Image (cartoon, grey):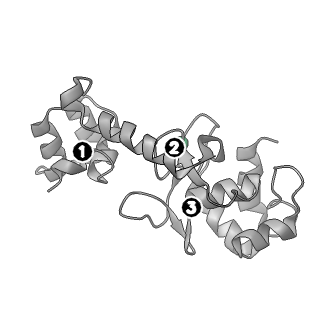
Amino acid sequence: MNLQQHIESSKINGPKGDWYSPIGPDLNDEWTIALANMSPIQIARFWSRVKTDQDFHCWEWTGQKSARGYGRYAGHMAHRLAYELVNGPIADGLVMRHKCDNPSCCNPKHLVPGTSKQNAQDDVLRDRSSRGVRNGRSKLSVDQVRHILRNPEHLRVRDLASKFGVSPATVSLIRSGERWSHLAK
Ligand SMILES: [Zn+2]
C-alpha cells in the first residue's frame, strides 16, 4: 500500500485499526498521537481535509488557511502536521520547507525539514521569481497581474488563467498574495 492508499483507507475506515500508524521507522501509534496531542478522530478529520493524490502531485489543504496560504488545523500548521504524522517529529529548531513551493500542499513527500536559514534562502528565491518582470522570465506584465488581482469581470480562476495563458496555480498564487504581493496594494 502506498502513502496515498494508506491515508485514503484511513478516511474510509475511521479511527479504528492501525491506519494512523506512522510509516516512519521506530515509532508507535501512541507516540505519534501524543506528538500532535490529537485524538484518532481529530487525525481522521485532519486527513479528510487533505486532497490526496499521486506522490508527484501537490496534496491541497481544503480547510482553513492563513493569510499566506498555509493550512491551519487545531492550532497546528497543516503541512507540518502531515509530515509529522507520516515521518515522526521534526527535530527541535527545524522548520518545514515545501520543495514544491506551494504553501497549502500537505503531501509529506513534498516536504523536507530544514533550518530557518535555508527557509530564508527559499524565500529569497521565491521573491526573485515572483518579481518576474525584472528577470524577464515572467509571462505576465504588471498590468496583467493587477487585472488578475482586481478581476473586474469576476472570472473564475480557470478562466483568468486561460485568458492570460498561465496555469490556474499561478492565478491562485497571485490572488492569495503568494506571488506579486508587492502589487496588491
Ligand atoms: Zn506539493
Inter-mark Cα distance, 3 to 1: 24 Å
Q: Are marks 1 and 2 in contact (CB under 8 Å)?
A: no
Q: Which of the marked residues, 3 or 1, is nearer the chain's N terminus? A: 3
Any atom of ligand 1 within 8 Å of the CB at mark 1? Answer: no
Q: Which of the marked residues, 1 or 2, is nearer the chain's N terminus? A: 2
Judging by the rendered image, the residue that carries numbered circle 3 is: 78
Against 16, residue 160 (above or below) is above
Q: Position of residue 84 (x, y in %)?
A: 70, 58
Question: Which amino acid, mark 3?
Answer: Ala
Question: Which amino acid, mark 1?
Answer: Trp
Judging by the rendered image, the residue that carries numbered circle 2 is: 118
Query: What is the quadrant of the N terminus in the image?
Result: top right
Q: Is residue 152 left or right of residue 62?
A: left
Q: Residue 180's mark? A: 1
Crowdedness of circle 1 by 10 Å Cα count: few (<14), some, many (20+)? many
Query: In the rendered image, which quarter is residue 3 located in?
Result: top right
The residue at the point 40 percent across, 57 percent down is 69
Question: What SS does tag 3 mark?
Answer: helix
